[in-house]
Amino acid sequence: MDNFSGKIAVVTGGGTGMGRELCLQLVQEGCAVAACDVIMENLEETKKLCAGAAPDIKVTLHQCDVSSEVDVLRFRDEVATEHGDKLNLLFNNAGIGGSFSMVDEDTRPQWEKTFNVCWYGVYYSCRAFMNMLVNADEAHIINTSSVNGFWASLGPNTPHTAYAAAKFAVKGFSEALITDLRLHAPHVSVSVVMPGHIGTSIAINSGKVLSGKDASELNEDDIKAMRERMMRTGGELAEAVMNLSDDQIRQVMHQRGVDFRDNAPTTAGQASKIILDAVKAGKWRILVGEDAVRLDARVRNDPESAYEIDFAQAVQEGGDLNELIN
């Protein structure tokens, strides 16, 4: 698929970040888009931007929690009604972040929500849209994993099991689909995307999805639980929160989300272009960002040391993932 003109694409998580940029760049190439998100106001902004960039290209908006198969099937039916029964591109982009320990039973709901959005969102969407993809003359599935799909860590002081497990699942599933599709639907292909640190609002939006609140809206009980989790993990952050007021913790959480978005080495627009160019080139494995390329090489070069403290320190000293590793 060397161009997207006249094609139809589904983009999950299309309200912000890479999802929004994928929508924008697709419509600029003449591709109709059906975008979903859990936050409709973000989708409305995406549609406004798309209309300004390509007013004649059809863009439809759909509220959908991809961790719910019922929601995804409804989304599929809405897409079929609006765009027909053929689909050329499926971008499974939706995701949230969450650093919760398997040992902490109190955070099990958040752990499972993170896993369900990041893994089951991909699986449910592939299941739901598969017949529409097969109905098209040519089709391509693009599943977003992460560098945490080959390195299950955010450093020695951050439990990261839910997100990493989901992203490993996405990577393995996508690679297995290469053979599955070649045997049963050879005109449908698949790519797995592994971004490094991309400038998106995922950290800010994840808090909204997991707690239903902005950082500024966290109450005393929320802050108490957060403070206790931070202190249990150890490291500089644990030492810092001992001396912070509740308001200061709210400010810290908000600022961390802003810094993640604004201090990234790769913008969402740059990341989306890398992805779309790689799809046109027929690549199944898409590393996004030089930090992802370097981390991939580090892990492959010394897998036995990948989870040692010195490894994470070396990654940071090399200039990578500074806003992520704690």
Image (tube, rainbow, N blue to C red):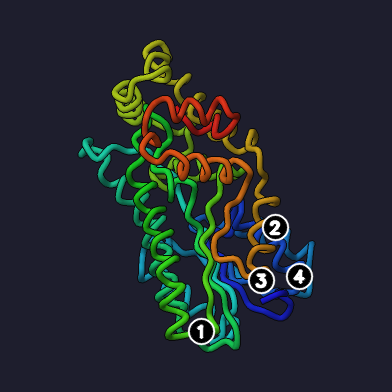
Q: Which mark is residue 273?
A: 2
Mark 4 lies on residue:
29
Q: Which mark is residue 186?
A: 1
Label 1, label 3: how far apart the Cα atoms are: 28 Å
Picture quarter containing residue 11? bottom right
**4 or 1: tag closer to the N-terminus:** 4
Contact between marks 3 and 4 (CB within 8 A): the answer is no
Mark 3 or 2: in front is 2
Q: Counting other residues with Cα less than 10 Å from the Cα at mark 4, is it few (<14), some (14-19), or many (20 or more)?
A: some
Which one is in front, 323 or 106?
323
Q: Which quadrant does the C terminus fall into?
A: top left
Q: Amino acid at mark 2?
A: Lys
Residue in the image at 23% along x and 36% along y: 104
Residue in the image at 57% along x and 33% along y: 320
Mark 1 or 3: in front is 1
Residue in the image at 37% along x and 38% along y: 99
Mark 4 or 1: in front is 1
Mark 4 or 2: in front is 2
**2 or 1: tag closer to the N-terminus:** 1
Contact between marks 1 and 3 (CB within 8 A): the answer is no
Mark 3 lies on residue:
59
Residue in the image at 78% along x and 68% along y: 54
Q: Amino acid at mark 1?
A: Pro
**3 or 2: tag closer to the N-terminus:** 3
